[in-house]
Amino acid sequence: MDILVLCDQAKKTARNWAKNQLPTIKNKVKPLKNFPDEIILDGLVNNWFELFDEKIKNRQEKFYLAQTASAIKKVEVSVYRKALKKVGKKQLNCWGIDEKQRNLLLGDTATPGLLEVAGRADSLFLRFLQASYFSPQLLDNQPAKQKSFAVINKLFPKESGDISLGLINISQQNCWFSEEQSSLLFQRYLKILSSFFSDLNYKKIVKKQKAIEKIYSQCLRSGFPIVLTPPLETSQFEPYLDPELRISFRDKKTKNQEKTFQTLKKNLSGIIKNKQIEQRDIFLVNPIVSFGVNLVFCGTAQEKPEIVIFLREQKESYDKALPTIVNKFMAAAINETTVEKMSLFLTIFHEIFHLTGENSPCLKNLIKKTSGKLGLRDALETEAEILYRPWLLKMSESKKLFGHKEQWAYAMTASSLQALKDLPENNSYFKAACYTLNELFAQKIVYLKNKQFYIKKENNYQDFSYAQNQLVKNYLLALKKNNFPSVSYLLANLKPNKQLCSAISFLKAS
């Protein structure tokens, strides 16, 4: 049985359990009564809170839903436990792990395994979320330079301490680790991660964060089959890192797939000559369970310190939906398999072009220039979404990428339309999609006719390519020069213009 089949079984079991809880959930969260059951279940089971979050204003209700998602997650984990306990060596090998690694995941009567210990990130995140909702002063009233994970450890010592103790205990079970370099490296990683969840000194925690990023990269490159994603990003309460632990597997199939994308990266870096693109590797993983911030937002990918694509989330969020958009609404004939493949490539291109770091002086100056109207995440996602597009088109023209330029133009456009159809207006990906499409609709390079979206195709889609280049140029002027017209243009185009509003209304009504 393929690991993704097991993932589907776990989600199905969790969904059935959640379905039985729907009357109680709707009774406690009144706005959900206006949503179809399937949307509510998608949001809670797949952790897509953006499906209904905009309509729920009451923070008590929001917090209750996060707690509910944690309960659903426990049902999901129980499926993995049962499966891991009963399968033989052959099936374990199919999933990419061996018996020692199974023990590492399950633990024993004396020492809880990684499945249980990582699950404790839910409790820590819920406490963190509770504070950000109801006692924000606890997080806000800290010296600016000291706003780090040390504050979270200090405020919630039991929850972070439980994770720290669990990780160090696992690392001390030598019988769960082999003498292979990758296994010993993962063992050392657990020790460093344990200290990260216990340290109260903000100066030390910043150094440990860098050490974690370094050894996490080393673990990925070593080929160890279990991937434990640590807290790396901020979304709930900037600038604090979101509590998170995410368990994934890597098997022979994913490692072979990675070779395709390493070649892609090599071809791209040969054209652009960018060190950041050259230095980061691309990894594909099969996510098993995702704890912590993943209760309310389960990302499909990660851009640092390496590019990691979480294949199940990618498949559920984008690969399944994009062919529907293309086949139903786009005036282009692209078969479903090709569109699904393009969907994965679009995500990887997006992650590759996360080139400006969160601490970039240019980015900080840009946000300051907008008086805070431009959020950090808005800027980062808009940058990644627009920068890759001209280069992707050039690669397709030079035959360094499968598919024709026309197909990629339609796939990119459909990807942006998908975000506009499915996401709320305050979502960073929605804003990024607006930036990619506003000008195209305003100039009628992309237009709606007879319930189909067309792209102006004269001279091999020259206008489409030119518009992409101009959007990149404007963004870079805003970022690097803080050019006032460019900054104003950027802000204005993070919202849909009149033509794009009509397109969104059509999509939502269809």
Image: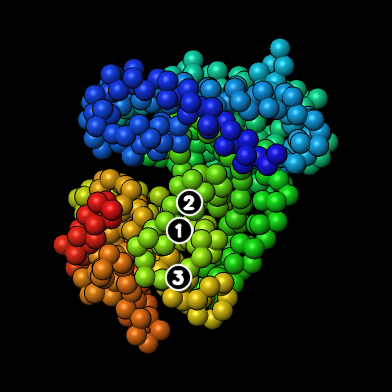
Q: Disc 2 residue type?
A: Lys
Q: Disc 3 residue type?
A: Ala
Q: Which residue is mark 2?
A: 320
**Gap between marks 3 and 2 measured at Cα:** 17 Å
Tell me the quarter of the picture where residue 463 sits: bottom left
Q: Which residue is mark 1?
A: 323
Q: Which residue is mark 3?
A: 333
Q: Residue at x 61, y 25 (%)?
A: 79
Tell me the quarter of the picture where residue 488 sits: bottom left
Looking at the image, which is closer to me, 321 or 297?
321
Q: Position of residue 492 (x, y in %)?
A: 19, 60
Work out whether mark 3 precedes mark 1 in sequence or the reverse, and give the earlier one.
1
The answer to whether residue 234 is above or below residue 86 is below
Of helix, strand and loop, which one carries label 2? loop
**Gap between marks 1 and 2 measured at Cα:** 6 Å
Q: Is residue 445 left or right of residue 235?
A: left
